[in-house]
Amino acid sequence: MIPIIGLMIGTYIFTRMLELATSKEAHVAVKLCAIITLVVVAFCTVMLFFAGSQFGRM
C-alpha cells in the first residue's frame, strides 16, 4: 500500500512541476528548479516502482 501512495504522490508532483515548467508566466529560475525537480521525481518514482515490484515477488 505504501509504494502505491508514493507512486501517486510522485505522479502528482511530476504533473505539477511539468505544468510549472511549461508556464509562460514563470521566471527562468523557477522553470530551472521545476525541471530539476522533474528529473529527481521521475528517478525516485521509477526506483520506488521497481523496489515495490521486487518485494512483491518474495
Image (cartoon, rainbow, N blue to C red):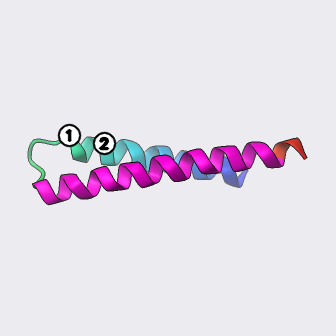
Q: How many marks?
A: 2
Magenta region's main secondary structure?
helix
Pointer 2 residue: 18
Q: Does the segment drawn in magenta span residue 49?
A: yes
Query: In the picture provided, is 26 more to the left or to the right than 20?
Result: left
- Identify the element where label 1 is drawn: loop
Residue at left offset 36%, top offset 55% = 37
Residue at left offset 20%, top offset 52% = 31
Q: Position of residue 7 (x, y in %)?
A: 58, 46
Residue projecting furthest to the right: 58
Which quadrant of the structure image shows residue 18? top left
CA–CA distance in space, label 1 to label 2: 6 Å
**31 and 7: which one is in front?**
31
Mark 2 closeness class: few <14, some 14–19, many ≥20 residues within 10 Å: some
**15 and 50: which one is in front?**
50
Q: Does the segment drawn in magenta span residue 53?
A: yes
Q: Are marks 1 and 2 in contact (CB under 8 Å)?
A: yes
Amino acid type assigned to the residue bearing label 2 in the image:
Leu
- Identify the element where label 2 is drawn: helix
Is 44 placed above or below 56 here? below
Pointer 1 residue: 22
Which quadrant of the structure image shows residue 49? top right
Mark 1 closeness class: few <14, some 14–19, many ≥20 residues within 10 Å: few
Q: Position of residue 56 (x, y in %)?
A: 83, 44
Residue at left offset 68%, top offset 44% = 50
Q: Position of residue 44 (x, y in %)?
A: 54, 53
Which quadrant of the structure image shows residue 53? top right
The span picked out in magenta is 28-55
Query: In the picture provided, is 58 more to the left or to the right than 34?
Result: right
Amino acid type assigned to the residue bearing label 1 in the image:
Thr
